[in-house]
Amino acid sequence: MTGMTLIAFIVVVLGVGLFLFRAIPAIRAYFTYRGKRLITCPETQQVAAVDVASGEAAVGAFLTEPTLRLTECSRWPERETCGQECLQQIEVDPENCLVWNIVSQWYEGKHCVLCHKTFGELHHLDHAPALLSRDRKTVEWRELRPEQLPAVLADHQPLCWNCHVTETFRRIHADLVVDREPEPKRMM
Ligand SMILES: [Zn+2]
């Protein structure tokens, strides 16, 4: 190896090393900041649902540190010119304001109000669990607007997906469903 190629080799190795060194915080920022979040809007003191530009946060983290900016808010487009002060709440605790984590924590350890099955942690590939209202209507949590979730969770009972399907069928085909008492076992 000549002197020049050796220097070129060292430069390439250092470059790759530096790239990987910066790529790790960038990837971490991307996964930390993606997803729908619930914050308390500093202007209204009400819940709002927001999205952070996770790609931009990753680029920021690659160069120096993650720069946070909203790409969506449930109060937009009316309030699109707001100062995005809610970003502070996300910066302080990015995990606990993530909708997925809020819902997962709410279900975990609770029991289905009808079949008493215990809920574990939420999984993306599973059927979404549902909720039962006071007037016995069922809804999958994913069908709700995220900013409605805190109020709905406070007012509904947890329902597993199977019971949600059964209850929905029962509501739509009320005329077809007959609740039979199980027949008493005959004594021999
Ligand atoms: Zn159930």
Image: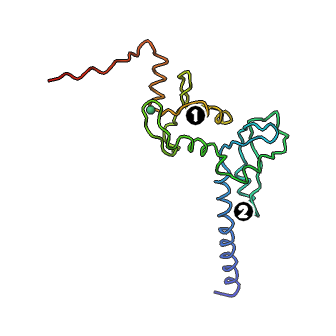
Disc number placed over residue 155 in the picture, else none: none
Q: Is residue 182 above or below residue 154?
A: above
Disc number placed over residue 141 in the picture, else none: 1
Q: Residues within 10 Å of mark 2 (few under 14, many from 20)?
A: many
Quadrant in which residue 22 is drawn: bottom right
Q: Position of residue 60 (x, y in %)?
A: 75, 59
Q: Which residue is mark 2?
A: 62
Q: Quadrant of ligand 1?
A: top left
* 76 horizontally vs 106: left or right: right
Q: Is residue 159 above or below residue 54?
A: above
Q: Depth check: 13 or 184 in front?
A: 184
All told, the count of numbered labels is 2
Q: Depth check: 124 or 119 in front?
A: 119
Q: Residue furthest top?
A: 175
Q: Secondary structure at mark 1?
A: helix
Residue at (14, 24) in percent of width and height: 188
Q: What amino acid is found at the position of numbered circle 2 in the picture?
A: Phe
Q: Quadrant of the N terminus?
A: bottom right
Q: Position of residue 157 (x, y in %)?
A: 54, 31
Q: What amino acid is found at the position of numbered circle 1 in the picture?
A: Trp
Label 2 and label 1: CA atoms lie apart by 35 Å
Residue at (65, 64) in percent of width and height: 24
Residue at (49, 23) in percent of width and height: 168
Sequence-first disc among 2 and 1: 2
Q: Secondary structure at mark 2?
A: helix
Q: Position of residue 18 (x, y in %)?
A: 69, 71
Q: Position of residue 155 (x, y in %)?
A: 60, 30
